[in-house]
Image: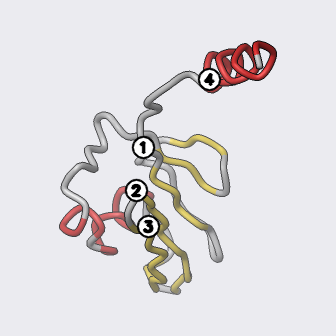
Amino acid sequence: MGHIKVEVAYANPNKQVIISLKLNVGASVREAISRAGVMADFPEIDLAVNKVGIFGKLVTPDTILHDADRVEIYRPLVCDPKERRRRQASKTSRT
C-alpha cells in the first residue's frame, strides 16, 4: 500500500499549527485530524461542530485525501462578516 503526504491546519486567536503527516492511501480527513493530534492540543475542536475543508473547499470528515492535500479545520464564526462590514461602514460614515 502506498503513502500520501498531507498537512492539517488549525488556528485560533492565540496559536496556529500546520502539521505534516504521511498517511496510507485511502486515509480520510477524520483520520488525518486524529493522527495529527490537534484535538488534544485544541480541546475546543469538535468535528460535530467545526467544519472542515481541503484548500478552502468544505468537505465531510469522511472525504478521502489525495497526496499534497491540506486539511483545514474551521472555527465557528463569532460574527457574520457582512454584518461586521455594515457596522464598520456605518461607523466610518458618521465620523
Give me the residue at 49% from left, 66% from top: 9
- Identified by mark 2, the residue type is Asn
Dot 3 falls on a residue whose secondary structure is loop
Q: Nearer the viewer, mark 1 or mark 4?
A: 4
Q: Earlier in the sequence, mark 2 or mark 1?
A: 2
Report the residue marked by disc 3.
Answer: 27
Q: Nearer the viewer, mark 2 or mark 4?
A: 4
Q: Earlier in the sequence, mark 1 or mark 3?
A: 3
- Identified by mark 4, the residue type is Arg
Label 2, label 3: how many angstroms apart (C-alpha)? 25 Å
Q: Residues within 10 Å of mark 4 (few under 14, many from 20)?
A: few
- Image position of 86 (left or right of 45): right
- Image position of 39 (left or right of 86): left
Q: Position of residue 6 (x, y in %)?
A: 54, 76
Q: In this figure, which colouring scheme has been used for the structure?
A: secondary structure
The label shown at residue 84 is 4
Whether residues under marks 2 and 1 lie with C-beta atoms below 8 angstroms apart, the answer is: yes
Give me the residue at 68% from left, 20% from top: 82
From this view, report whether residue 63 is shown above or below residue 38.
above
Dot 1 falls on a residue whose secondary structure is loop
Q: Nearer the viewer, residue 39 or 88?
A: 88
Report the residue marked by disc 2.
Answer: 12
Q: Nearer the viewer, mark 2 or mark 1?
A: 2
Label 1, label 4: how many angstroms apart (C-alpha)? 17 Å
Label 2, label 1: how many angstroms apart (C-alpha)? 8 Å
- Identified by mark 1, the residue type is Arg
Q: Earlier in the sequence, mark 1 or mark 4?
A: 1
Label 2, label 4: how many angstroms apart (C-alpha)? 19 Å
Q: Residues within 10 Å of mark 2 (few under 14, many from 20)?
A: few
The label shown at residue 75 is 1
